[in-house]
């Protein structure tokens, strides 16, 4: 089990950028698949992006392809989500997620550990 703490959320205008970070405690981070999910008010939590334990595989939801990039630094126990060309529809609470059981973290049932979430608000 790892504890996950997100940072980097905030308010940005449409077209702007933000970088989210998620730092994990514990020595098993390098063996975890990591992902980002988001939840907008009144909507279900949805998958955004994921990266394998070694960084060799990534996957994105279609709506963020070409705009968001997921990366990880196992030496720092940190996973990042670089978000460019932000749109108002990207507004949500963003959650970091980890799994010791799967190659990638694509569904909520893959997740072993959740962060507390960080708010991202994109104004038009």
Image: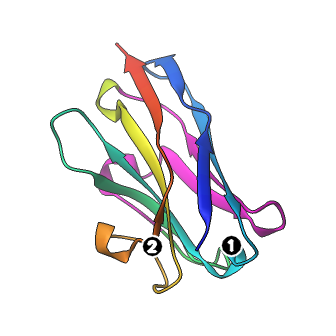
Q: Quarter holding the N terminus?
A: bottom right
Magenta residue check for 77: yes
Which of the 4 image quadrants contains residue 57? bottom right
Residue name at image x 65 percent, y 59 percent: 71
What numbered label is drawn on residue 108?
none
Residue that numbered label 2 is attached to:
112
User: Residue 83 location, x and y as percent?
Assistant: 53, 39
Outermost left residue? 42
Kindly identify the residue that appears in the image at 50 percent across and 47 percent down. 68
Q: Which part of the image, by quadrant, shows the C terminus?
A: top left
Q: Residues within 10 Å of mark 1 (few under 14, many from 20)?
A: many
Q: Measuring from the top left, give residue 2's x and y in whole percent.
A: 61, 68
Q: Give the vertical position of 118 relative to 3 (above or below).
A: above
User: In the picture shown, does residue 63 fall above or below 52?
Assistant: above
For label 2, the SS is loop
Q: Are marks 2 and 1 in contact (CB under 8 Å)?
A: no
Q: Distance between the residues labelled 2 and 1?
A: 12 Å
Residue drawn where x is 58% and y is 32% of the image? 18
Q: Which residue is labeled 1 in the image?
A: 29
| Residue 72 as seen in the image, left or right of residue 43 | right
* Horizontal side of residue 49 vs 61, given as left or right: right
Magenta residues, start to end: 59-87
Local crowd size for mark 2, using a 10 Å CA cut-off: few (<14), some (14–19), many (≥20):
some
Q: Which of marks 2 and 1 is nearer the N terminus?
A: 1
What residue appears at the point 51 percent right and 52 percent down from the top-left corner?
A: 115
The answer to whether residue 3 is above or below residue 27 is above
**Helix, strand or loop for disc 1:** helix
């Amino acid at each position: 089990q790892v504890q996950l703490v997100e940072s980097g959320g905030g308010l940005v205008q449409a077209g702007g950028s933000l970088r989210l970070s998620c730092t994990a405690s514990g020595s098993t981070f390098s063996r975890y698949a990591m992902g980002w999910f988001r939840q907008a008010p009144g909507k279900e939590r949805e998958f955004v992006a994921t990266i394998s334990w070694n960084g060799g595989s990534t996957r994105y939801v279609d709506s963020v392809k070409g705009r968001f990039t997921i990366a990880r630094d196992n030496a720092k126990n940190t996973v990042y989500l670089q978000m460019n060309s932000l749109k108002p529809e990207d507004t949500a609470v963003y959650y970091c997620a980890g799994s010791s059981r799967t190659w990638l973290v694509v569904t909520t049932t893959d997740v072993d550990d959740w962060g507390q979430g960080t708010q991202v608000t994109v104004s038009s």
